[in-house]
Each structure stands twice: as C-alpha cells, then as structure tokens.
Image: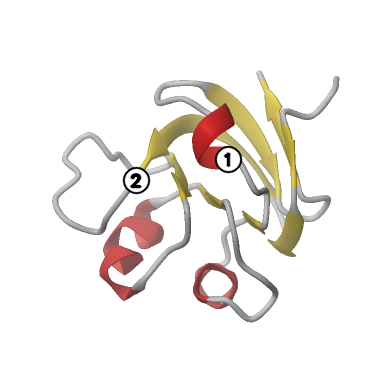
Amino acid sequence: MKPLLKGLGVSPGQVQGKVRIIKSGKKNPQFNSGNILVTHITDPSMVPLMARAGAIVCDIGGMTSHPSIVSRELGIPCIVNTKKATQVLKNGMQVSVDGTKGMVKML
C-alpha cells in the first residue's frame, strides 16, 4: 500500500486511529483518546491533547522539535516534516501511523 505521507519518524511505534486536525491547544471537545493529532507544529498549550493522542503527525519539525521530544517522553509514535499533513489528511480519516518508518497510510 502506497503511503499518503512520508516524513521524519522521530518516535517509534505503529498505531491506527482517526485523524483530528488541531490548530491550537484551546478547547477541542471533539478530540478523543487515541485520535491521531495532526497539526502544523505542536506547542506547550497542546500537551494535554498530546497526552491523549495515539500518535502525532506534523507539517514541520526536526529530531529535537517540540513534538519529537514530547512524543518520545509520552512513548507515542510521531512523524514530523511531512510538509503537507494538514492539507492531505482530513478530520475523520482512518489512518495507520508508523513512527519508525515515518509513514502515514490510509486504512
């Protein structure tokens, strides 16, 4: 199966879940535990959401960026530097995230 997105895998693991595009750490009542947090880049206001996420996928970032460090601390898969995750992925999509290989695939 061809990946929808490729990026830099910065926190290993594989998980499947529902995409939720997040623009800020403010109230996001539709974000449920296990959702895939998709954003341009995380910031400290998003840590409560990150703690409930099944995985994190970002448009930008590197090995020492905020989402990379926090995801490793939380032990959840993370991919950064996809360049277009917030454009390609849509709320509600069911995807597989491979934080080891840096790939997102549609289920």
Which residue is under mark 1? Answer: 85
- The one nearer the camera, 87 or 73, is 87
Query: In the image, what residue occupies the spot 58% across and 40% down?
Result: 85
Which residue is under mark 2? Answer: 22
- The one nearer the camera, 36 or 38, is 38
Query: In the image, what residue occupies the spot 27% across and 55% down?
Result: 24
Instruction: Give the secondary structure at mark 1.
Output: helix
Q: Earlier in the sequence, mark 2 or mark 1?
A: 2
Coloration mode:
secondary structure
Q: Position of residue 38 (x, y in %)?
A: 47, 45
Q: Position of residue 47 (x, y in %)?
A: 33, 68
Instruction: Tell me: 92 left or right of 104.
Output: left
Query: In the image, what residue occupies the spot 39% across and 59% down?
Result: 50
Hey, what amino acid is under mark 2? Ile
Instruction: Give the secondary structure at mark 2.
Output: loop
Q: Position of residue 19 (x, y in %)?
A: 46, 32
Does the residue at mark 2 contact the one at mark 1 (Cβ under 8 Å)?
no
Q: Position of residue 44 (x, y in %)?
A: 32, 75
Query: In the image, what residue occupies the spot 52% across and 68% down?
Result: 67
Instruction: Tell me: 101 left or right of 68.
Output: right
| Depicted 102 relative to depicted 16: above or below | below
Hey, what amino acid is under mark 1? Ala
| Depicted 46 relative to depicted 4: above or below | below
Circle 2 residues within 10 Å: few <14, some 14–19, many ≥20? many
Q: Which mark is residue 73?
A: none
Circle 1 residues within 10 Å: few <14, some 14–19, many ≥20? many
